[in-house]
Image (spheres, rainbow, N blue to C red):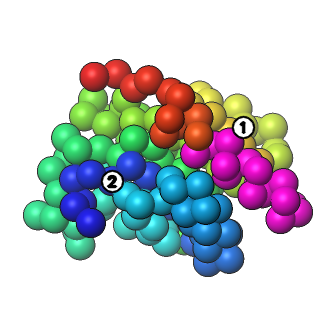
Amino acid sequence: MNPNSVEILLVEDNITDAELTIRELKKHNMANNLVHVKNGEEALDFVFATGKFAGTREIQYAPKVILLDIQMPKINGMEVLQKIKSDPRTRAIPVVILTSSKESPDIQKSYDLGANSYIVKPVNFEGFAQAIKNLGFYWLLINQPPS
């Protein structure tokens, strides 16, 4: 895969949730250009083409959407969101918070920091699968990003 053609950056430390998300996106042919990273540090390295991703891609070729968990090791999702949305090179990338937190302060802070959407992971598999399918269709096929 060409690292400059990534459509989805999945930032998820829970391997089960990541596998379910990837499987559901693949089922609907939306995971061909997906990169999965396991923590906020890797997410920022990918987005800004630094660290282990230095020299592998150009920063101007951003993912079409970032699916971002909040609670992760090293750098949490809120810090990742803040850094992405505060940089003029990356602030237009849609960031969807995909988390198990239903806490009102988390929701409010996410939107205050510039999240484009906040989705609580459904507890049951069918609900989770449907949420991922809808998420992929909207952000990859329906949404019109800035040029």
Q: Nearer the viewer, residue 8 or 59?
A: 8
Nearer the N terminus, badge 2 or badge 1?
A: 2
- 56 relative position to 114: left or right: left
What residue sits 72% from the left and 37% below the top?
A: 107
8 vs 76, nearest the viewer = 8
Q: Does residue 26 sit above or below 120 in this rendering?
A: below
Task: Kindly report the distance in space between the C-alpha atoms of the residues bearing marks 2 and 1.
Answer: 27 Å
- Residue 19 numbered tag: none
Relative to 112, say whether 125 is above or below.
below
Front position in the image: 31 or 68: 31
Q: Magenta span has 116? A: no
Which quarter of the rendering shows the C terminus? top left
The residue that appears at 31% across and 37% down in the rendered structure is: 90
Check disc 2 and give the amino acid type. Val
Q: Which mark is residue 6?
A: 2
- Write down the quadrant of residue 54 in the picture: bottom left
Q: Which residues are magenta?
A: 121-136
Horizontal and vertical percent for residue 15? Answer: 61, 77
123 in relation to 38, above or below: above
Q: Secondary structure at mark 2?
A: loop
Mark 2 surroundings: few (<14), some (14-19) or many (≥20) residues within 10 A: some
The image position of residue 78, as x and y in percent, is 55, 48
Can the viewer see residue 113?
no
Q: Residue furthest bottom?
A: 15
Position in image of residue 145 (x %, y %)? 40, 26
The residue tagged 1 is 107
